[in-house]
Image: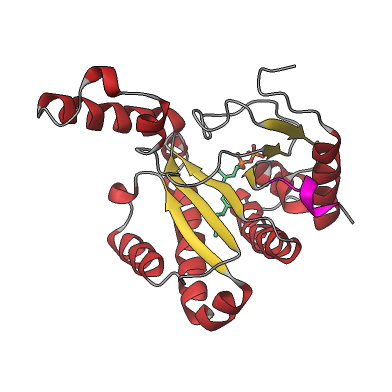
Amino acid sequence: MIDKSLLPQHVGVIMDGNGRWAKKRGLPRTEGHRRGAEVFRTISTYASDIGIPYMTFYAFSTENWKRPESEVAVIMDLFRDFLHEAEDRRAENEKRGFRFHFIGDLTVLPEDIRALADYMESQNPETWRTTVNVAVNYGGRSELVHAAREIASRVRDGALSPDAVNEQTIAELLYTRGQPDPDLIIRPSGEYRLSNFLTWQSAYSEFWFSDVLWPDFTTDDFDRALEDFARRSRRFGGI
Ligand code: FPP
């Protein structure tokens, strides 16, 4: 059991390796995503059980539209299923203390998904234990472009002076406004990159990599990441 004071307050997860997991088994890639969505449920539930207040899962990036239409459609279906299921289990989720938040540009998603996501956010409980951010059509650079446009238009309208723009101004214009930056970012599947995930927010994050493919990722793997994190010395530029 990890000392609670050493637990990260915010963990980001890049759910990678679904396609390879399926290929290894001679299954269509989409089966990997299906299994990956199950693991998303398991890990978010476990994170709330052990008291991690913020989790962010990278489900679909701004670059993932380059994938075959059929694969994108299945990922959207999985997202839709998750939203319906969360609605069906609202009482249970509320008891558990889940609060769901969607980060990314949802405006281009199918209308029913947008409506479901908006509705779900509007139903979030006042008190919660774990905020689960799901990143869909998310890109760190596009998030910063969005913030830059907003700052430019406030300056143009005379509502903001260029000299008053600081890190806080930008942080408050991101999808994660009001949330702590991720302390830990987990990337399974043997890849060692951030792939446009939480670009601004990850400035001081610790990284944890593993060769395990996301559909095989277990709560034991998650524990290993947390144990490693608890041993890290974070100096934030100090000594
Ligand atoms: C990356 O693996 C995974 C994705 C691009 C999609 C992840 C989506 C899900 C797990 C489902 C989301 C659903 C919910 C409910 C949040 P990859 O396909 O790039 O794997 P590969 O590198 O092995 O090809």
In which quadrant is the C terminus drawn? Answer: top right
Q: Position of residue 231 (x, y in %)?
A: 86, 35
Closest to the observer: 155 or 111?
Answer: 155
Counting the numbered discs, the total is 0
Query: Looking at the image, which is closer to me, 205 or 30?
Result: 205
Residue 26, percent from left and from top: 73, 50
Residue that extends furthest to the left in the rendered view of this protein: 157
Observer able to see residue 217:
no
Q: Would residue 7 be counted in the magenta stretch?
A: yes
Image x and y of residue 116, in percent = 36, 67
The quadrant of the rendering that contains the N terminus is bottom right
Q: Is residue 76 above or below residue 105?
A: below
Q: How is the image coloured?
A: secondary structure
- Magenta span includes 46: no
The quadrant holding residue 131 is bottom right
Query: Percent from the top left, x then y, of residue 89?
Result: 54, 80
Image quadrant in which you'd find residue 58: top right
Left or right placement of residue 73 versus residue 108 in this view: right
Magenta range is 3-8
Residue 138, visible in the rendered structure: yes
Residue at 50 percent across and 54 percent down: it is 75
